[in-house]
Image (spheres, rainbow, N blue to C red):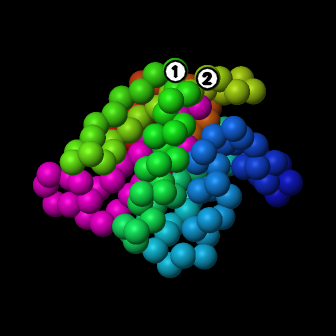
Amino acid sequence: MFVVLVATMAHAQTGMHIKALFDGRYKHSSAATEIVVTGKKAQQLNLALYHSLSVTNMSLAPAIMKAVVADGVQATSKEVEYRGGKLYYGYYVFARRQGNNRFVFYLDQSLARKQPVDKVTLIYMEGNVSSAYIKSLIRQ
């Protein structure tokens, strides 16, 4: 099972700029939280993989935004909002890979109009699910 988990994670973001972020760049930072859900837990969400990274050290935010924007060029569909020249919100749909749809969600809460918080969240999800389904998960 561990080998499957590692193999799934190792190839999940292949060819994407965000891969470097999920490959451990922030693993040992006390200002970062990483969540990986695979196997049965992911299947309960109808996903093959859920991988998130949240950082509270805003000096890390520009590198995350840069990687997301670079990947966004390859997206087949996207919804973005910029505030003050910075990406506030990004929702991206990418071409299918190994039978799964791929999605990236980005949110810079420091740019929120009400109750801003020093936190940037990046989520990568794969699964044979629709964009509407992913948006409903994000809203939860």
Magenta residue span: 102-124
Q: Dot 2 corresponds to which residue? A: 95
> Alpha carbon of mark 2 to alpha carbon of mark 1: how far?
6 Å
- In the rendered image, residue 116 lying in the magenta stretch gets the answer yes
Q: Going 65% across and 23% down the picture, which residue do you hit?
A: 96
- Looking at the image, the residue that sits furthest to the bottom is 30
The vertical placement of 32 against 85, above or below, is below
**Res. 37 visible in picture:** no
The three-letter amino acid code for the residue at tag 2 is: Ala
Q: How far from the left and from the top, in percent, is residue 107?
A: 36, 49
The three-letter amino acid code for the residue at tag 1 is: Thr
Q: Dot 1 corresponds to which residue? A: 76
Give residue 133's quadrant in the image: top left
Q: Going 26% across and 64% down the picture, which residue do you hit?
A: 117
Q: How far from the left and from the top, in percent, is residue 87?
A: 33, 45
Dot 2 or dot 1, earlier in sequence: 1
- In the rendered image, residue 61 lying in the magenta stretch gets the answer no
Marks 2 and 1 close (CB-CB < 8 Å)? yes
Within-10-Å neighbours for mark 2: few <14, some 14–19, many 20+? few
